[in-house]
Amino acid sequence: MSSASSNVPLLRPFVAGRFVETVNRRQLLAPYDRRVLGEVCECSQAEIDEALRAAESALALTRALTTDKRAAICTAIARGLLSAKERLAHAICDDAGKPIADAQAEVTRAVLCFELAAAEVLTTSGEGQVLPMDLAPLGYGRTGIVRRFPLGPIAAISPFNFPLNLLVHKVAPAIAAGCPIVCKPASQTPSVALVLAEILHAAGWPSGALSVLPATRAAADLLVTDDRCKLLTFTGSAPVGWDMKARAGKKKVTLELGGNAAVIIDETCSEHDLETIVPKLVYGAYSYSGQKCISIQRVYVVARQGDRLYRAVCERLQAAVAAIKVGDPHDPAVLVGPMIDEHNARRVESWIAEAESLGARRLHGGERQGTFLPPTLLAEAPPHARVVREEVFGPVCHLDRVPSFEAALASVNDSRFGLQAAVFTHDLGHALRAHEELCVGAVILNEAPSFRIDHMPYGGVKDSGLGREGIRSAIVDMTEPRLLITGVLPGTH
């Protein structure tokens, strides 16, 4: 990445193994203070077509890479990420406005993803299947052998909120599977994706088998519609994701979309338990200004025997939210920095106002200032308020009481989303019932629903997505099974 004439970095697309300059350019501004971070060269459909042609040609190279070579490349990338940890963390902090502590944790997770990918290469590569064919006379003397082969070029579209890790969740399994990959990072966060391209190239991933393409949504639509891509993996909003799926043609599609994650605190929890529960709620709801698809948005307290526990949750969570440090994301003590842009900050502000107009109580919050929206705690909004019904994707958490555990389960399920949910309980029966009845991709016990470790099969149901991420799950999606039926010609000795 060279420098532009204005002495800010020139962020050049990585097209088929080389950085290129393009005609279309725009400024990249920091969400925190609006300073110019760089000048982004954006790709036209011509560069995207070049990337797809190179990926199609590179498939012969990537599918021929031996198991040990793919594992070695993943290991080298993990080391490269670790060496560039501070550079990457500060790029995440600048581009996304993510607090630096969370940005550093994101790089650590990305390193783990490639370490997991290296390990999975060595296990899933040998994960064939032998099928007996002698179930019928026609199959006597024959055996079936199933092997998995690379699917082909992968199109990956990633969001702003985890600009490194959610891209890595697409790139690492593609390398492990032996598939070329063409990536479109979010418009606000191209820097880390371009650093990742440098690291992959240095690690020995074949030229042409990776492209990182900052582009407008209109130009990048070619990745959705072009049949040279054999799988489209998208992380982002539900309306955009389902529209992509409708237009994707014959290719496989994996969608990791939105949510409005809910927490149940049941009647077996005591006020003493809140000393453990409340810090988990605070981090799960407000870290990175709630701009996570599994950020806590709804908390249901079971009040079967009066409101004492509910009142205690309100009081303690209100005090904890008031103590959150808000400000410069470069400050390691800051939990809540800016939202990604003022448009979204205004949107969330209007949803809070709507909830209050419908009868919600504001337990904590304040006035928006530009991209900064103070952490807001609401109580007792009606189910049709947007802060309850939709994905807020901002620093807002809503509390309510329910009369029974059964009512809590019903409230969690009363949503078009179903990504992850959490239950705080001492009752094993409640835990098992939640696992049985909650319509979500994962139920987390006695921890926030924002819990994720990168080997998990991660994804949701309903409007929250299609398929699962996680290194092993993605490798399976990026490969296809092929069956060989053995046989011996008559007279062969």
Image: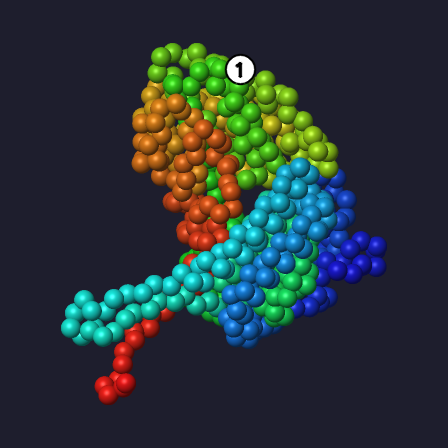
- Disc 1 marks a residue whose amino acid type is Glu
Identify the residue at horizontal 44%, vertical 16% (top origin). Answer: 270
Identify the residue at horizontal 38%, vertical 19% (top origin). Answer: 268
Q: Quadrant of the C terminus?
A: bottom left
Task: Give the side of residue 29 with respect to residue 280, left or right.
Answer: right
Q: Residue 150's x, y, as percent?
A: 46, 67
Q: Residue 347's x, y, as percent?
A: 57, 37
* Neighbourhood count class around disc 1 (C-alpha, 10 Å): few under 14, some 14–19, many 20 upward: few
Answer with the quarter of the image where residue 342 lies: top right
Identify the residue at horizontal 31%, vertical 65% (top origin). Answer: 130
Q: Residue 163's x, y, as percent?
A: 61, 49
Q: Is label 1 in a helix, a strand or a loop?
A: helix
Identify the residue at horizontal 39%, vertical 45% (top origin). Answer: 461
Q: Nearer the viewer, residue 175 or 437?
A: 175
Residue receiving disc 1 = 315
Using the image, determine if residue 353 lies above or below residue 36: above
